[in-house]
Image: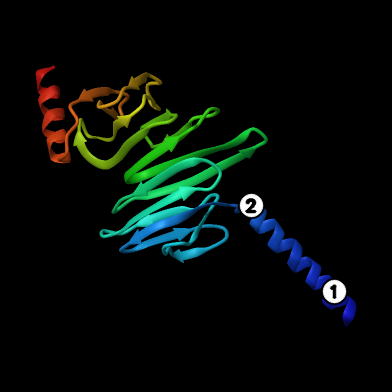
Amino acid sequence: MYSRNLILFFCYIFLVSFLFSRGENIGFCLDVKGFVQRDGKIRNGVLRKGDPIYNGDKIITGSNGFISYAFIHERTSAKIFENSVVKINTNMKNIGSFSKLALFGGKVVIQSEEMEEEPFTIWSPSSTCKFQNGHIIIEYKNELLYDNNSYCLFTVLNGVSEVRNNISGNIMYVKKGRSVVSTMNGKFLELETFRNSNEIQKTLMIKENVK
């Protein structure tokens, strides 16, 4: 009986160690408002202020949801707004950590500082964005607004961002104060920086009619 309990104990320790090695704590919540939940290997359910963020967590915000969090291993912070779905991954290496955020819908704001090695990467169905030491707003619209395609809007508040369209492979470098739309049919459109997303739709329609 003692031997059996000892074996079960070591199996439990091994299982816990294995799970936590695959779900390392990479950040923590600075602020949470409204409905925000996570789907991960370590924890599932509602997220609250002060909770850890684990590698591979998928974060979902409701219609009134908002969350801001900071990464532990790099000077990067993120804000996720309502009706958003993101997944967070960090690769740990000897020379540093390299984080990626997949945006499946909604709006995020990322700010990074003192990144000297690999850039921070944001992936969406239409585009891949890389930047270092910058501040950027990314909004993925999963709706039929332009040419019957969804699109991703990038607005650079500080620094320079490399935006690659995943469909065409074309690359654009977006500077401070500029906005670019990357569509699911491989197109780029440079825009004025708008506060109201409805203005983006109007501008896209005008540009299409002019062609």
In this rendering, position of residue 5 left or right of residue 132: right
Q: Is residue 65 above or below residue 2?
A: above
Using the image as rendered, state which of residue 52 and residue 105 is in the foreground: 52
Q: Is residue 25 above or below residue 144?
A: below
Residue 6 shows which numbered tag? 1
Quarter location, residue 61:
bottom left
In this rendering, position of residue 16 left or right of residue 132: right
- Residue sitting at x 55%, y 28%: 117
Q: Tell which residue pokes out farthest to the bottom in this image.
A: 1
Q: Earlier along the polypeptide chain: callout 2 or callout 1?
A: 1
- Residue sitting at x 33%, y 63%: 35
Quarter location, residue 11:
bottom right
Q: Tell which residue pokes out farthest to the top in this image.
A: 211
Residue 145 shows which numbered tag? none
Using the image as rendered, state which of residue 90 and residue 103 is in the foreground: 90
Q: Which residue is mark 2?
A: 22
Residue 207 in the image: state x and y as whole percent. Answer: 13, 23
Residue 203 in the image: state x and y as whole percent. Answer: 13, 29
Could you say whether the residue bearing mark 2 is in a helix, strand or loop? helix
- Which three-letter amino acid code belongs to the residue tagged 2? Arg
Q: Residues within 10 Å of mark 2 (few under 14, many from 20)?
A: few
Could you say whether the residue bearing mark 1 is in a helix, strand or loop? helix
Residue 138 in the image: state x and y as whole percent. Answer: 32, 38
Q: Quadrant of the N terminus?
A: bottom right
Gap between marks 2 and 1, in whole Å? 25 Å
- What kind of colouring is applied to the model shown? rainbow
Quarter location, residue 93:
top right
Q: Quadrant of the C terminus?
A: top left
- Residue sitting at x 79%, y 72%: 9
- Residue sitting at x 48%, y 40%: 75
- Which three-letter amino acid code belongs to the residue tagged 1? Leu
Residue 121 in the image: state x and y as whole percent. Answer: 46, 34
